[in-house]
Amino acid sequence: MNKLTDLRRFINRDNNIVQLLIITAVIFLLMSALEPHKFLRYYNFESISFIFPELGIVAIAMMLAMLTGGIDLSVIGIANLAGILAGVYFTRLYPAAPDAGMTAELLRVAAGVILALGVGLIAGTLNGLLIAKVKITPILATLGTGQIFTGFCMVLTGGPAIVGFPAWWGFIGNGKILGIAVPLILFLAVAVAIAIMLTRTPFGLNLFLIGTNPRAAIFAGLRTDRMVLYSYMLSGTLAALAGIVLSGRTNAAKSDYGTSYLLQAVLISVLGGTNPAGGKGTVLGVSIAVIALMLLASGFQMMRFSNHLIDFIWGGFLLLVMVINVLRNRGK
């Protein structure tokens, strides 16, 4: 009886999660029926477990920006810049010594990870200062910085991809621990940490308050500028982590990698229940949404849909979800 009561409370509290689970189940059943011999193979799900974490981390970064009523259009630029600067460090500044042992290589890779995450933190800080202190509209600020980051990537590489990352860097994107993909483990760790931060800490609760009612947050004595700055710093750091996973999986970094991820990250955040106006969003919703879209994308690829057609579908799907959310809110 208690379990049934808890289930009802869960459904009443956030019926969006239940809808997402139904959508995911429908997509799974539909793709299983259309391409059973390809879609249901173990290799397909293993491949998804390596690919979806980088998109999932970017989507969580996007959600954090949206919680305050903003948006971060620079996440892909940050991700690529972090990967490229790490590649420059590995190939030009600190190449591997011929007789280097495993400990030296691990330290070299750890330094590269710190460098990449530091790039994300600095980039996120720039975004936060432009939005919180200079008072530039988030969409314009991050659109501009995203172009700057991408342009800097072009300057560093001249256009071609940087290749030749260390083997341990590749382990971050392609390795397994106890048969589980390392990117999946990283995504789960990030998802749990951000979920706890949003629901169990004053910082997370303040983010929701700022997005729900900025004026009330000011009257409540919250330092909204600082909270917004912190949210973009965290968003930039997560984007850099996604860049580490992406460059580790592909053993390369380039200025235009993951360009389609930007639209998909926005779609996943909105589909996952994040309110673009701020104040609402859950890591669980984003996690389910990214799984649903990856299952759908996998099915599309097996049916040999054009990548351009898939982007068209994503864009139309995003508009549809936003229209449905608006109509639903009007009905309340």
Image (cartoon, rainbow, N blue to C red):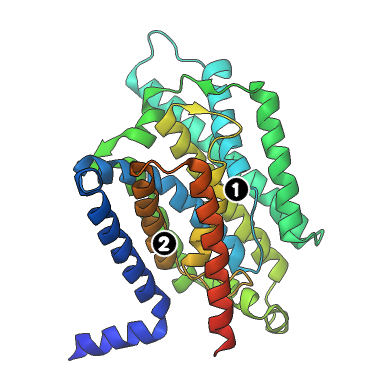
How many numbered circles does the render carry? 2
Q: Which residue is mark 1?
A: 75
Where's residue 306, x and y in %? 47, 41
Mark linked to residue 289: 2
Quarter of the C terminus within the rendering: bottom right
Where's residue 85, x and y in %? 59, 29
Q: Which residue is rendered at x = 45% and y = 73% of the image?
A: 199
Residue 280 lies, with reference to residue 122, above or below; the image says: below
Question: Is there any visible trace of residue 146 in the rendered image?
Answer: yes
Where's residue 52, x and y in %? 39, 48
Label 2: element kind: helix
Question: Comparing marks 2 and 1, which lies closer to the viewer?
Answer: 2
Label 1: element kind: helix
Residue at the extreme right of the image, as rendered: 134
First along the sequence among labels 2 and 1: 1
Label 2 crowd (10 A; few <14 / some 14-19 / many >=20): many
